Amino acid sequence: MEYNTQIQNRVKRIEGQLRGILRMMDENKDCKEVITQLSAVRTAVDRTIGVIVGSNLVDCVQKANENEESNAEDLIKEAVNLLVKSR
């Protein structure tokens, strides 16, 4: 799978958020603020996983159609399993 700039930018934003959280911890910020930011990171990671799995599924189904393979159901099951694993 090719990871486009949109996906890479999402991961870079997450990286920046994590660095900000570490800075907050170094500054002994209130735990509620840290938890809020950690929750935001978790949400961003979950959404990124969804984008990657969704893109991968589309690519796989298109390739299967090009090769006249009829395993779209298996590909969908695999994508669902990836999403379930991520939780």
Image (tube, rainbow, N blue to C red):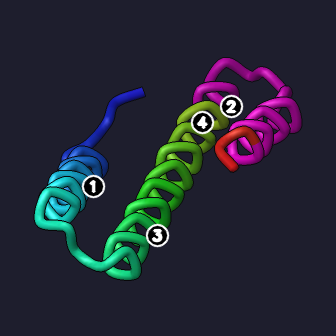
**Element marked by disc 4:** helix
Comparing marks 2 and 3, which lies closer to the viewer? 3
Q: Is residue 63 left or right of residue 26?
A: right
Residue depicted at x 46% and y 69%: 39
Most frequent secondary structure within the magenta stretch: helix
Give, as a three-letter code, the residue at label 2: Asn
Q: Which mark is residue 65?
A: 2
Q: Residues within 10 Å of mark 3 (few under 14, many from 20)?
A: few
Which of the 4 image quarters holds residue 31? bottom left
Tell me residue 46's x, y (percent): 53, 57
The residue beneath circle 3 is 39
Q: Is residue 6 magenta?
A: no
Q: Nearer the viewer, residue 42 or 62?
A: 42
**Element marked by disc 3:** helix
The residue beneath circle 4 is 62
Q: Nearer the viewer, residue 19 or 63?
A: 19
Q: Residues within 10 Å of mark 4 (few under 14, many from 20)?
A: some
Q: Residues within 10 Å of mark 2 (few under 14, many from 20)?
A: few
Tell me residue 83's x, y (percent): 69, 46
**Element marked by disc 2:** helix
Q: Nearer the viewer, residue 15 or 55?
A: 15
The residue beneath circle 1 is 14
- First of labels 2, 3 by sequence position: 3
| Stretch of the chain drawn in magenta | 63-84
